[in-house]
Image (spheres, rainbow, N blue to C red):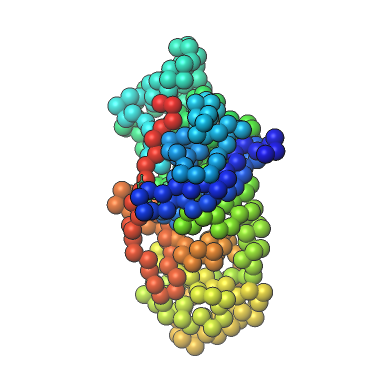
Amino acid sequence: MSDDAAIVVENLHKSFGDVHALRGVDFRVDRGTVLGVLGPNGAGKTTVVRILTTLLHPDSGRALVEGRDVVHQAAAVREIIGLAGQSAAIQEELTGRENLEIVGRLYHLEKATARRRAVELLEQFDLAGAADRPAKTYSGGMLRRLDLAASLVARPSVLFLDEPTTGLDPRSRIGMWEVIRNLVAEGATLFLTTQYLDEADELADEIVVIDHGRVIAAGTAEALKDRVGGNVVEFALPDRDRLAEAARAVAGLADGDPSIEPDTGRVAVRVGSRGSEALVQAVRELDAAGIEVDGLALRRPSLDDVFLALTGHAAEAEEDGGGRRRRRRSRHGASAPAGTETDATTEGVGR
Ligand SMILES: Nc1ncnc2c1ncn2[C@@H]1O[C@H](COP(=O)(O)OP(=O)(O)OP(=O)(O)O)[C@@H](O)[C@H]1O
Ligand SMILES: [Mg+2]
């Protein structure tokens, strides 16, 4: 292991009964960088987070955080990590300030130090004005920020964020991104799972794509896009009922299946190295089918395209029963059933 590895994961396996959640996962994260972990629901992301944060033992394989083994040196690992999990570990009856002070005390900070640290974090996370209100009165975005603040009380050098912006409105997400960028600027190493591919594109130095408990691709966002290769012709339909029809009309120029986003009415077609001539052909085909479109354009692949190409099933944004936004997108024609995976929960570390 080289000195600048903050996280090393080797051949991790984990089963829950006959569910093989992890089937040999390997990756490493350099110190002071952000790893973005992408994967559809049930891919194994939270399982990796729980193993790395000592909440769960792997069946086999090895994981080191700052050189400390997560199984054999679990206490030492806990001293240097922070976790903001998929379910917030905030006590909602207590105020934001009390929540942070309690976490500080759990980390054995002096009372005065815990108090100072709470004030600092409340300022940093734009919660000072709400510091003395019970957390149950906070909005979803405020709760996420408080949860993240709680994970930072002990100044962890390695931070695990499991879907930190799922369920946040666009403005709160961008606020959270800024907070995350500042953390990294201060030198923290970040392990970030997300289902928002623009988030990984925006924040991650390296990306690992997990599907069915295996790493199916890794590299920078740009390298992954190059790997999928080629251009994408994209357009939106004013008439959402004609999505499948439009996808069929342009299927002839596609490298693979066109993808459809029912929520936004968008259709994307991978056209390889073809450029404007593919665009012209799309216009002709859609025109011949009598389908009106908006914003027909040619662009480089997005991470969404990469994801679809790699996993065969990307995401469409949708609310699940718990009000969390899920990203799912269907292949041409076929829509995946909603809510087929149950959510695993993570507990807080050291609280
Ligand atoms: N405690 C558990 N008991 C049984 N099965 C589990 C448990 N935890 C996870 N699993 C299963 O392991 C697989 C991986 O789950 P995991 O929570 O790691 O996925 P994920 O990638 O985090 O998904 P999501 O995007 O929905 O959060 C899933 O099939 C899940 O149902
Ligand atoms: Mg998860």
The residue under the point 55% across, 39% down is 63
- Where does the N terminus fall, quadrant-wise? top right
Q: Above or below — where is 345 with respect to 348?
A: below
Q: Position of residue 147 (x, y in %)?
A: 43, 33
Name the image quarter holding the C terminus. Answer: top left
Q: Nearer the viewer, residue 147 or 58?
A: 58
Residue at 66% across, 77% down: 274
Task: Count up the numbered dots.
Answer: 0
In the rendered image, is residue 221 in sight?
yes
Task: Please say if 87 is above or below 260.
Answer: above
Depth check: 294 or 98 in front? 98
Would residue 183 be found to the left or right of residue 263 on screen? Answer: right
Q: Residue at x 33, y 24 (%)?
A: 94
Tell me if 135 is positioned left or right of 284 in this view: left
Q: Is residue 290 above or below residue 276?
A: below
Q: Residue at x 64, y 67 (%)?
A: 229
Q: Position of residue 301 (x, y in %)?
A: 60, 64
Q: Seen from this angle, which residue lies furthest bottom?
A: 288
Q: Is residue 97 visible?
A: no
Q: Position of residue 173 (x, y in %)?
A: 48, 45
Q: Could you say which is closer to the camera, residue 112 or residue 4?
A: 4
In x, y percent, where is residue 155? 55, 26
Q: Quadrant of residue 345?
A: top left
| 142 and 43: which is toward the camera | 43
